[in-house]
Image (cartoon, rainbow, N blue to C red):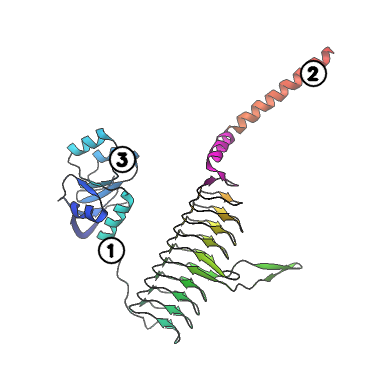
């Protein structure tokens, strides 16, 4: 992160109170900006969450450093202390840094009105203190909660609902009947409630299966840019409370994702898969349709999940297998050329021995 100054100035002790941490050093030192440890200047606060960066404590120009009390390096810390470094100890440095960042750079206040260039059907219900920008279209029977922000180009289909304090960035589409609960954030160009991919074979052609269900997105979900979440054929596609979805993710019809899960970029989840609570699907994971992944599961990047996974497991690979087994397989895979060469040499020697024994008989 490059150096970034703010108009706000706070003493380190105030920041420690905000972040729920403790100060070692000068509580009164004034902080006016945030920066990465290698580019920080006087007046900046920076952070370390990984012990491999601890050596930079002695060379950084930052006025204060957010650091975990679990990071131990007595020699380095002693030298840093002698150099007049100030520390904000926080159990979760990332979280502390996020709170400080939010304090110094609060989000810009949106346009607080309904712009005359927005198109809102007369039967739509609009809450209080909304921010509706130009070229927004709200269709018949839609319900928009209080303090909702709809940026330019947002489309809300007929009978769709958007809950209080939700923010939909430019060109988000919420198709007919879909439900968005409270405090949801959806980034640009995402589509909620597109048709599921369903076709019945009719000779050599395909007959489209009507997709008559909806998508339901629960409270405190955040959805990245260019995400597509398909409506159910019947019933609901569900995104559980607090789940965070990265950019460029495809979630098919009738999928259920539990609370507080993390879905990283380019994940694809096929129809009717059930994903548990607190599940992490790393980048480019593919999940087969009609399978179930239990709670507290982690799936490694680029893995293909082809069968059920029980709770509290770590899986990797294609097809995905327990992570420890995958690590062993990867070690063997790297040695396959050498093993093949050895095997061919052994086969040659065996044939030579067979020929020698045959000639002696």
Residue 255 at x, y = what percent? 56, 62
Q: Hey, which residue is sitting farthest bottom in the picture? A: 122
What residue span does the magenta drawing correspond to? 312-334
Q: Residue at x 42, y 61 (%)?
A: 242
Badge 2 or badge 1: first in the primary sequence: 1
- Report the front residue among 136 and 148: 148
34 over 162 or under it: above or below: above
- Location of mark 3 (residue): 71
- Location of mark 2 (residue): 355
Q: Residue at x 20, y 42 (%)?
A: 85
Q: Residue at x 25, y 48 (%)?
A: 40
Image-quadrant location for residue 105: bottom left
For mark 1, does the 10 Å Cα neighbourhood hold few (<14), some (14 to 19), or many (20 or more) residues? Answer: few
- Location of mark 1 (residue): 106
Left or right of residue 103: residue 161: right
Residue 172 at x, y = what percent? 46, 70
For mark 2, does the 10 Å Cα neighbourhood hold few (<14), some (14 to 19), or many (20 or more) residues? Answer: few
Residue 279 at x, y = what percent? 48, 54
Q: Nearer the viewer, mark 2 or mark 3?
A: 3
The alpha-carbon separation of the residues under discs 2 and 1 comes to: 83 Å
Mark 2–mark 1 CB contact (< 8 Å)? no
Q: Nearer the viewer, mark 2 or mark 1?
A: 1
Q: Hey, which residue is sitting farthest right in the picture? A: 361
Q: Quadrant of the C terminus?
A: top right
Q: Nearer the viewer, mark 1 or mark 3?
A: 3
The alpha-carbon separation of the residues under discs 2 and 3 comes to: 66 Å
Q: Secondary structure at mark 2?
A: helix
- Report the front residue among 232 and 340: 232
Q: Is residue 4 visible?
A: no
Q: Secondary structure at mark 1?
A: loop
């Amino acid at each position: 992160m490059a150096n970034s100054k703010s108009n706000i100035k706070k003493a380190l002790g105030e920041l420690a109170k905000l972040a729920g941490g403790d100060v070692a050093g000068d509580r009164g030192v004034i902080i006016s900006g945030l920066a990465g440890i290698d580019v920080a200047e006087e007046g900046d606060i920076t952070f370390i969450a990984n012990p491999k960066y601890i050596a930079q404590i002695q060379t950084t120009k930052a006025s204060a450093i957010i650091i975990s009390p679990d990071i131990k390096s007595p020699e380095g810390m002693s030298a840093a202390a002698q150099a007049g470094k100030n520390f904000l100890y926080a159990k979760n440095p990332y979280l502390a840094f996020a709170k400080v960042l939010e304090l110094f750079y609060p989000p810009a206040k949106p346009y607080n009105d309904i712009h005359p260039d927005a198109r809102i059907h007369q039967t739509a219900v609009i809450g209080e203190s909304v921010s509706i920008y130009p070229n927004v279209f709200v269709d018949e029977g839609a319900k928009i909660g209080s303090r909702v922000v709809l940026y330019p180009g947002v489309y809300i289909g007929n009978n769709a609902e958007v809950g209080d304090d939700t923010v939909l960035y430019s060109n988000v589409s919420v198709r007919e009947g879909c439900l968005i609960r409270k405090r949801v954030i959806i980034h640009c160009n995402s589509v909620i409630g597109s048709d599921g991919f369903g076709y019945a074979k009719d000779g050599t052609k395909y007959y489209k299966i009507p997709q008559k269900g909806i998508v339901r997105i629960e409270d405190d979900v955040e959805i990245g840019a260019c995400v597509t979440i398909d409506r159910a054929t019947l019933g609901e596609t569900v995104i559980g409370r607090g789940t965070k979805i990265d950019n460029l993710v495809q979630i098919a019809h009738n999928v259920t994702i539990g609370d507080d899960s993390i879905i990283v970029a380019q994940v694809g989840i096929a129809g009717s898969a059930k994903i548990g609570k607190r599940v992490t699907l790393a980048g480019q994971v593919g999940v087969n349709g009609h399978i179930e992944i239990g709670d507290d599961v982690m799936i490694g990047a680029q893995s293909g999940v082809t069968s059920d996974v029980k709770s509290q497991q770590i899986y990797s690979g294609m097809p995905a297998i327990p992570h420890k087994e995958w690590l062993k397989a990867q070690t063997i895979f790297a040695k396959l050329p050498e093993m093949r060469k050895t095997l061919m040499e052994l086969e040659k020697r065996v044939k030579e021995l067979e020929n020698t024994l045959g000639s002696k008989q």
